[in-house]
Structure formats: C-alpha cells, structure tokens
Image: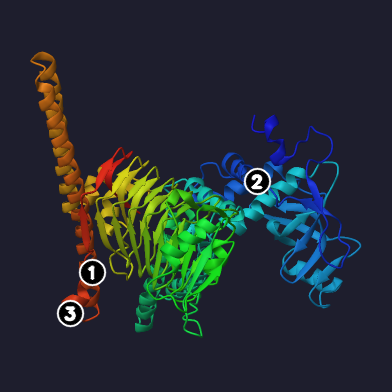
Amino acid sequence: SDWSADSWSDYGSRDKPGTTLGRTVPEGNVLFPDIFHTDHLLFYERFRAYQDYILADCKASEVKRFIAEYLEKVLEPSGWQAIWRTDVFEVLVGVVGVNFPALKAVVQLSEPFLCESQDSSFTLECMQELLELKEHQILLQELWVVYDESGEFDQTALAIEHVRFFYRCIWRTWDEEEEDEFDYFVRCVEPRLRLHYDILEHRVPSGLVADYQNLLSQCEQLYEKFLNVRNSISSNDSDSEAENVSMVEGLKLYDKVEHLKQKLKLIENPLLRYVFGYQKYGSLQAKGLRPTGAKVIHVVPWTMTANLLHLLARDKLCPESCEDLEIQFHRDPLAAVNACYEGDRVIICPGHYFVDGVFSIADSVELEGYGLPDDVVIEKQGKGDNLFDCTGANIKISNLKLVQHDAVEGILNVHHGKTTLENCVLQCETTGITVRTSAELLMKNSDLYGAKGAGVEIYPGSACTLLHNGIHHCKEGILVKNFLDEDYEAPKITMVNNMIHNNEGYGVVLVRPAMPSEMKDASAQEMKGTFLFLEETPKAIKSSIPRFLDCILHNLYLKFVSAGEETACAEGSRQEQPGCVTDELELCKRAETSEQTENNSEIANVLGATSAKKSQIHKKRLSELGFTEADDNLMSQEMFVSVEGNQFKWNGKGSFGIFFF
C-alpha cells in the first residue's frame, strides 16, 4: 500500500515500461553520457516524499537512520552508472554496492576513463589512489545517475535527488543537537522547504533572501568555531586558567549561534517571516538640488485638453511668484518621479496609469493627484518587491489611489526620513505600509484595505502618526514591533480617530520576543517557535508583566458586564413595556462608547508597559557594563503613545492582542 498508483510521478514505477523521467546533457568538454533530469521537482512532490516516505515523524537524531531505511527499499544496490561530481572534478563511475547506514555508494572507475577537472592533474592513476583512500566509498549525494530508458533506475535517481536536496537545502549541521521532543519534519523540514520554493517563485523580498543567506553563512561559521572550542575543552581534563577562558569563549559563541538560529527560524516560518526587519536600499543616493538651483513642476497628463490646461494653470502652475517657473511634461508617473530633484513637485492628472517598476524616492519631493483619489489611479503591473520606496527627508504623497498586484513586499515602504500620506486610497496585496527603523510616517484622511499581512507595520525606532484613517479587510490592522532584545528605541506612535474594522485578526497587534521567564512557563503549553496568544498563556504573562493581564481581564470584565446589561434590558423589553426600547438603545450606545474608550486606553497602557520593560532592560545592560548613572533623557526608551478616539469594530480576534515569539 505504500507504493500506490498515484505515487509513480515521484518514485517511478516498476510496473510501467520505460522511464518517466527526463534527461539532460552534462555541461563541459568531456562527452559524458546523459543523466536523469531530477532537479525540477515541484514543492508537493518533495513535500510528500519527505513526509510520507522518508522522514515521517522521526526526531532530529533519527534522520540518518530513517533515510537509510528508505534507501534500502528503493535504491538499486548495484549495476548502474553515475557521474561523481565535486568542486574540482567530474568522473564517470560504476556502482557495485551501497553502504546504506553511511549513505555511501561503493564505486569503481568506469571504462573508458572519463574525467573533467580544472587542471590536468587528475589522471587515471590519481583517481584510483583517491578512491583507495576513500575505500571506494563516496557520498550518494555526490552522484548523478546516468540516464537509462528502461525505467529500472528511476526510483534510484529520484531517491538520490531527495537525499541530495535534503542535505543541501534542508539539513543544518546543528540540527542533530536540537531537542528531540518535537517532530523534525514539522519543526524544520516543512518551513525550510516552503521558504526554498517561496524564494524560487519570487514570493520573498530580495533583501530578505540576501539577509537569510548571510545569516546562514554566519551561523555555520560560528557553529564550527563553537564545536572546535567545545572539543578542545572536552579533550582536556585540567582545570587551568586557559580552559576557563575557553569555556567563557564557548559560552559567548553559543549565545551568538542561538541568536542567529532564532533569526533564521523567523525567516523560515511563513507566519513570522516579516517580523524580522532587514535594511534595504541603504545605497540609494539622493540627487540633491539641481546644479542651477531651480525647482521644477512635473505634469503627467493622461490626455491633455485646453480646459484641463487652463485649470492646471489656475490651480497649480501659477503660484504667487511664477516668473522663472519651469514645467516639464511626462507620459508616465514613474518617469516623472525619476526626473525629480530636491524640492520638485509632480502633479498627476486624472487617469488610470499602469506602472511596471518601483517608485524609489530619495529626495524631498511632492507627488500629488489633481482631483479625487478615485480619479487618479496608479496600478502596478508585473512582479516586484513593492510599489513605493521612500528614503527622502520630507516626501509628501496626496490625492492618489494606489493599486498593487503580484507583489512580494508591501505597497509602500518608508526606509528613512519622513513620508506624509494624505487623502489617499491604498488597495494592497501583501503588506500595506511598512515604517522601518529611523523612519517617520504621517498618514491622515486615507483608506487602506486588502493587505494579506498587516495594514500598517511599525518597526522599533520609528515614528508613526495615524489620523482619521480607515484600515480594514486586512490580515491584521496595525502591527507594532518592539524587539526587547535589540538595541533599538521603542516606536513613537500616535493614533487618533481612526476606524479599524473588519480585519481577519486583531485591530492592533504588539509583536515582541518572549522573555526567558515567559518561555519557561509557556513551554509546557505551546510549541516553541509558534505564536503564544495572550489569552491562552496567562501564566507566562502574569509572571513578568502583570499590567498586561490586569488590563485585559479588566476589559473582559467590562465587556461581560456590558453584555449582561444588554441581555437584561432586552428581556425587560419583552416582558414589560415598549418604552424600554429607547432606554435599551441608549444603553447599548453608551456601552459601545465605553468599550471603544476602553480599547483605546488598553492599547495605550499595554504599549506603554512594554516600553517601560524595554527601558529596564537597557538600564540593566548599562549597569552590567559598569555605567551606574545615566542621563534620564538618554535612558528614556519609553514608547510615546497617544491613542484616542479610535473605533474598533468587527475585527476577527478582537481589538488588541500580543504575539510572543
């Protein structure tokens, strides 16, 4: 039953005549025979292979044994040829046996001798000596099976491909030392496999991909150093000063490795991937002022008529002093923005503009739609990271509707400087607006919807002011990221009179790492690396931040009392007189107003408490370094919070929540 009829595409079929796999011609000058083409497998094919046939529910320490048992079932033990590939040479070999526990093949050189190398030193005699040193055993993942039309070796080629892919893209050198209490496939294989295919299919921002590769390389190097230090300590039984120094060095390396591993897990986890912030477009340079010092108004007309030109001249093109005003006309909003210098202004006339590219704004410019937002639409075409990247000192975008499709990142990223968004409509696809560290966003009188992530993401060290906006029909409304373990200031947040409604999750979410005491209590209830919901882990929160729990419990109590009053009033209206209907409506209105006030107060209190916790951590770090006195202004890491008059309605999980990771 393990080899059902619908699995032949993954593993070949002994019952079907001929091969089901393609062939490919090896590159190079040597005429090697063709090999099986197996590196094109789809996500679900690899997923099913690892989950159902290879790893199942094994632990990290059992991985090699499970792979060996799988290979014993599907691998032909001898009688096939393969190309042995290394970084310096390729040689044709014949397989005469398999050492399954070691995941190695027993090989001998094929006749005629075919070898290609970077130099001419790998002669027949040299290769024979090398094989003798290796006892004629080489790793299976270094073999590419020679093509055979009979189909007899399809399963062999696919099995080796699965092993090769696993050790190249999934396995980490430190995995075997991880705790064995969790399913290895669920904890490691699935998220890494999904990340690999998300990258292949361009669903992960290029900057995040580069960061992941850099982190992985750093972690591997540090882990190797850690192993060397640990081995030097374990091989020396003396209690000397040098060994004590090595132990301290080993602890420091271990701490660094664990820190990098946590960052890697954040990116590997599709739910937490965008919690990890990365710096992007740091090399984008501002043009500055024009050499002539002049400022230009750029006009983008969909169609230009005499009446429109007259209106533009009256409203926008003739300010009080317009003697030397220069005006340039463009057919494309992106071309107009790319032509801007410091202080320029872009006026986009009514029309529906399709743009294939990214608006990268590094100077202080103003981008304005002439008319209502629904009349001036900029719609992104083609795949890309995002639509707007803002790094200018003072950027203003107004009276536009922005529409995003097939994106990887959010619709607008504020990386540096200040960006003002006024009277705009943003139809999102992935994340909405992201306010990065050291950046500032002022968003007012705007409408944002449709984000599959958060409508607005606020990073540590940023400033975000939201006034009179609508944020709705997103995965989460507003996501506030406060990394207590990073050396960033807390974000400064102002939220006044916003309508946050119909979001799938919470209206406002605070994301932060769990403290050790919280993780210790929560580990008995939740799996590591997953979200710890506030309402599901009261013990973890009560141990270190009781204000959070008290605030939530108080709010729940108010809602319970309010609900009870509504029920009592409703029953009275049915049993007594119709006059109670008016009182019921008034009571419900008051209860709703009271609930909205409590929601605003709750968010302000919790964000403030989290900021205070961060301030304590910074003071503790300075104290450990020997700084016992510090300027209160420098030490003030508290989050500036002003949350007033906001309305939270019909959000799937409630008005406010906290995620620990």
Residue at the (49%, 55%) spot, across then down: 268
Name the amino acid type tagged 2: Leu
Q: Are marks 3 and 2 in contact (CB under 8 Å)?
A: no
Number of marks in the rendered image? 3
What's the CA distance linking mark 1 and mark 3? 12 Å
Name the front one of labels 2 and 1. 1
Looking at the picture, tell me which residue is in the foreground, 55 or 11: 11
Q: Secondary structure at mark 2?
A: loop
First-in-chain label (1 vs 3): 3
Judge whether 257 appears above or below 530 on screen: below
The crowd level at tag 3 (other Cα within 10 Å; few <14, some 14-19, many 20+) is: few
Looking at the picture, tell me which residue is in the foreground, 57 or 290: 290
- Res. 393 visible in picture: yes
Judge whether 210 appears above or below 605 on screen: below
The label shown at residue 637 is 1
Residue for badge 3:
631
Judge whether 336 appears above or below 384 on screen: below
First-in-chain label (2 vs 1): 2
The crowd level at tag 2 (other Cα within 10 Å; few <14, some 14-19, many 20+) is: few
Left or right position of 404 against 489: right
Name the amino acid type tagged 1: Gln
What's the CA distance linking mark 2 and mark 1? 48 Å
